Amino acid sequence: MNIKRAKEEIKNTIEAYLYKDSYGAYAIPEIRQRPVLLIGPPGVGKTQIMEQISIECELGLVAYTITHHTRQSAIGLPFIVKKEFGGKEYSVTEYTMSEIVGSIYNKIEETGLKEGILFIDEINCVSETLAPTMLQFLQCKTFGNHKIPEGWIIIAAGNPPEFNKSVREFDIVTLDRIKRIYVEPDFSIWKEYAYQEAIHPAIIAYLDVKKQNFCQIETTVDGKQFATPRGWEDLSRLIEVYEKMEKNIDREVVGQYIQHNKISKDFANYLELFYKYEDDYEVDAVLSGTLKEGLLFKAGRAPFDEKLSLIGLLLSKIGVTFRETLEREKAVESLMMQLKRFPKKNGRGPSGKWNNKYGNDNNLKCEGMEK
């Protein structure tokens, strides 16, 4: 499924897991609340949707990339305690609280949100020493001796083995205890997101024409070659800043983000044409309402690819303008809400009459009036 549907599925799962019966207990017992496992190619947006979901569902969010952790940071450090069994005293190993579990309690104190999401990224790329701990985590919802707090949903993400040599296959026992969702790249869905996030119009217009270059990961004689949604988004931000700094964006720059020789070269060439079309067709002037007859004639006789690029350029520019307008409207609405909170000291009061520091307008007196 695409990332939009995956997001919807996760939100539905969270709502179901947190749904309570008439007695205030979770309708689906915690033991039956399977962790969600997102599997998909790198850069498709698995991590990005988690913050969106936590905000939209008003939940806390604690996120970790598990490959950055050791066994000690995941389950805690060992210490010795004395315990009595059958009348005899024994030394027993216990563990300090896991850093991850501790972060959940910190988040609860910071936000006051007792329910939330624990997101573990790259869960199928853990080290050999940490692998048993991850299996225990998925099966029992514990890190070491410490259980994940009630009301916290476990969501994990990972890449398929063809994209990462470090991937460890889960056994059937583990897979039978999780809710697995496969995510596939979908340009039409990403395009909606691209307009919302003001991705550079050149990238949107280019991928509109060459959708096959949106997400490609392949192994060639020259090694791994890939272009990912994350790469396009990061390149977009760089292009925006480079334009403001008046720096050149060539194939070498593009190739630092789109690490696919053929695609990076193709897009770099397209970017040059994009700037050329923007100048030749006076796009900014057209959007401001000035349209010359010569431009219409030129566009009418242009090759099909040029027409398609020009349409994409105009639509992308219009999308950016709409977004900027919407943001200004939201800023004005927010400002109005803030202004309404100020006490009405000067200006018109609730009755509609003007007030000032001397009182209302009926009692207003000027110097010399009494004389």
Image (tube, rainbow, N blue to C red):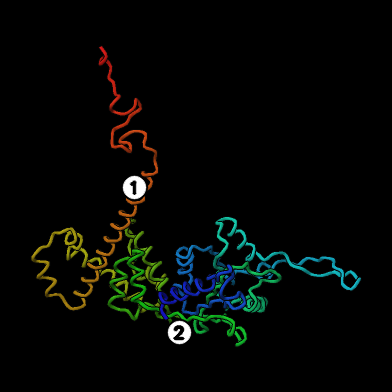
Alpha-carbon span between mark 1 and mark 2: 55 Å
Identified at 59% across, 82% down, the residue is 177
Tell me the residue that label 2 is attached to.
Answer: 219
Residue 207 position within the rendered picture, expressed as x and y whole percent measured from the top left: 31, 75
Looking at the picture, tell me which residue is in the foreground, 23 or 120.
Answer: 23
x and y percentages locating residue 271 in the rendered image: 29, 69
Which numbered disc, 1 or 2, marks the residue that appears first in the sequence?
2
Provide the residue designation for mark 1: 336
Percent across and percent down for residue 316 are: 27, 67
Q: Is residue 332 visible?
A: yes
Q: Secondary structure at mark 1?
A: helix
* Image quadrant in which you'd find residue 330: bottom left
Quadrant of residue 185 in the image? bottom left
- Left or right, 122 with respect to 4, comes to right
Amino acid identity at mark 1: Met
Q: How many discs mark residues in the rendered view?
A: 2
Which element type, helix, strand or loop, lies under badge 2? strand
